[in-house]
Amino acid sequence: MYAASDIHYPHYFDLFKKSLNNISDEPCLFLLAGDIIDKGKIEGAKPVFESIFNKFPNSKIVATFGNDEWNELWDKLKEEYSNIDWIVDDYKVYSCNNISISVIGTPGALDKPTRWQIKNIPNIQEIYNNRLTKIRELLIKAKKISQKTILLSHYALSKLTLKGENPYSYGELYSSKMEKIIVETRPDVAIHGHAHRGTAYALLQNIPIYNVAIPLVKNITKIIFIKNLEGFL
């Protein structure tokens, strides 16, 4: 399977499309970890989705929202692009090569809400706390009913993949509580975006963490499971 984020159409679309054209194997799942569009301009999602469908007509696109997919636009995005599996603080189970895979999707959480969030979303800390509780529950549930689990988040999931960013900004890029949840529940793979100057890949107690932000990796990321599914697409 493949994953990308932070295309911020049109800013990194040419890079995204060039990377897409270089892929020869059609994946079962194509995962998008948010910020597909830029500053709420939902029309930018159309060329991104069309480019994927034109290249891989049989792939299922699975996406969650980033901070540039503004909350008030979520319903409209779901309605206009109903052929996309939008997963927001929920999970869906897919069958790929006879392997059941749960994808838990979430915009993610932050240790330190941004000044804009504090000003415009007064209950933002409560939202994050409730989201963390729910994601933990979903991960536990998903692991019981599927062979593999993937956590797909927009906000970063570990300080390990923030290396390269200003350490003083870590709190506005990821949630240390979410990182702890990952260690406790142990999904098979964790995927995020948002950190444009971070690190593309790290192991968190042997759990693969992928930062798939296009501005960082300059490519679409191929996601590979460990050992028994090595090379699995």
Image (spheres, rainbow, N blue to C red):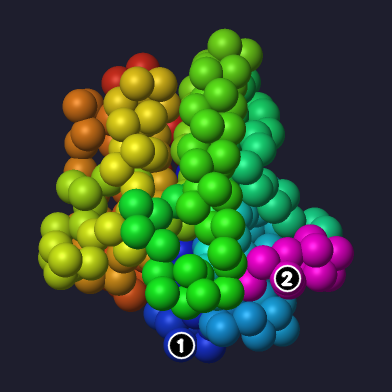
Q: Is residue 78 magenta?
A: yes
Q: Is residue 89 left or right of residue 176?
A: right
State the residue at coordinates (70%, 52%): 86
- Residue 150's place in the image compared with 174, above or below, is above
Q: Is residue 196 visible?
A: yes
Asked where in the image residue 91 lies, by quadrant, the reply is top right
Q: Is residue 222 visible?
A: no
**Element assignment for label 2:** helix
Percent of width and height locating residue 16? 45, 74
User: Residue 11, which numbered label?
Assistant: 1
Earlier sequence position, callout 1 versus callout 2: 1
- What range is drawn magenta here? 69-80
What secondary structure characterizes most of the magenta part?
Answer: helix
| Of the two numbered discs 1 and 2 in the rendering, the one whose residue sits closer to the viewer | 2
Pointers 1 and 2 in contact (C-beta within 8 Å): no
Q: Is residue 153 left or right of residue 174?
A: right
User: Residue 101, which numbered label?
Assistant: none
Q: Which residue is mark 2?
A: 72
**Element assignment for label 1:** loop
Q: Is residue 180 left or right of residue 206?
A: right
Kind of residue sitting beneath label 1: His
- Residue 102's place in the image compared with 35, above or below, is above
State the residue at coordinates (58%, 67%): 121
State the residue at coordinates (49%, 52%): 125
How many numbered marks, from 0 up?
A: 2
Q: Residue furthest bottom?
A: 10
- Residue 161's place in the image compared with 66, above or below, is above
Percent of width and height locating residue 46? 71, 77
- Residue 71's place in the image compared with 231, above or below, is below
Percent of width and height locating residue 61? 65, 53
